[in-house]
Amino acid sequence: MESHRVHVFGSDYSVRADGGAEHVRKVAEIVDARMREIDRQFQPGSGTRTAVLACMNLVDEQLREGETVARWARRRVGTLIDKLEAVL
């Protein structure tokens, strides 16, 4: 596990991660951008509040994307089953 320095929402952090430096940097950039977006949308408050809202926003996005992929996979598998049944 490597240690990486990142800058997020005005603070520096040392992060230990299995991912390479580029991956850790990209994650930090995404979190920083989302926190800044949340901070602009709402009346600036505490960093903790901004971090929690940003995390909830990112997780919500991931869950929705996962649901979309799952729906696509179910449709695709259903289509393949229909084709197999037609052949058999």
Image: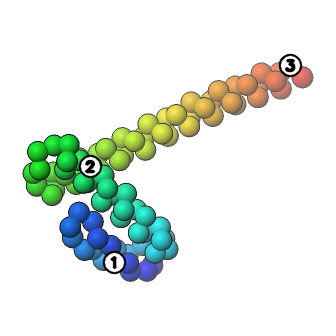
Residue at 70 percent of width and 25 percent of height: 78
> Residue at horizontal 69%, vertical 30%?
76
Counting from the top left corner in percent of width and height, residue 82 is at 77, 21
Kindly tell me whether residue 34 is visible in this rendering: yes
Horizontal side, residue 73 vs residue 26: left or right: right
Sort mark 2 into few (<14), some (14-19) or many (20+) by Cα contacts within 10 Å: few
The image's mark for residue 37 is 2
**Badge 3 amino acid:** Ala
Q: Amino acid at mark 2?
A: Glu
Residues 59 and 44: in front is: 44
Numbered circle sitting on residue 67:
none
Above or below residue 76? Residue 8 is below
User: Which residue does the numbered mark 3 point to in the structure image?
Assistant: 86
**First-in-chain label (3 vs 2):** 2
Tell us which disc is closer to us: 1 or 2.
2
For badge 1, the amino acid type reads Arg
Query: In the image, residue 38 lies at what x, y percent?
Result: 23, 47
Cα gap from disc 3 to disc 2, whole angstroms: 51 Å
Q: Earlier in the sequence, mark 1 or mark 2?
A: 1
Mark 3 surroundings within 10 Å by alpha-carbon count, few (fewer than 14), some (14 through 19), many (20 or more)? few
* Rendered image: mark on residue 5: 1
Q: Residue furthest right?
A: 87
Q: Tag 2, which secondary structure?
A: helix
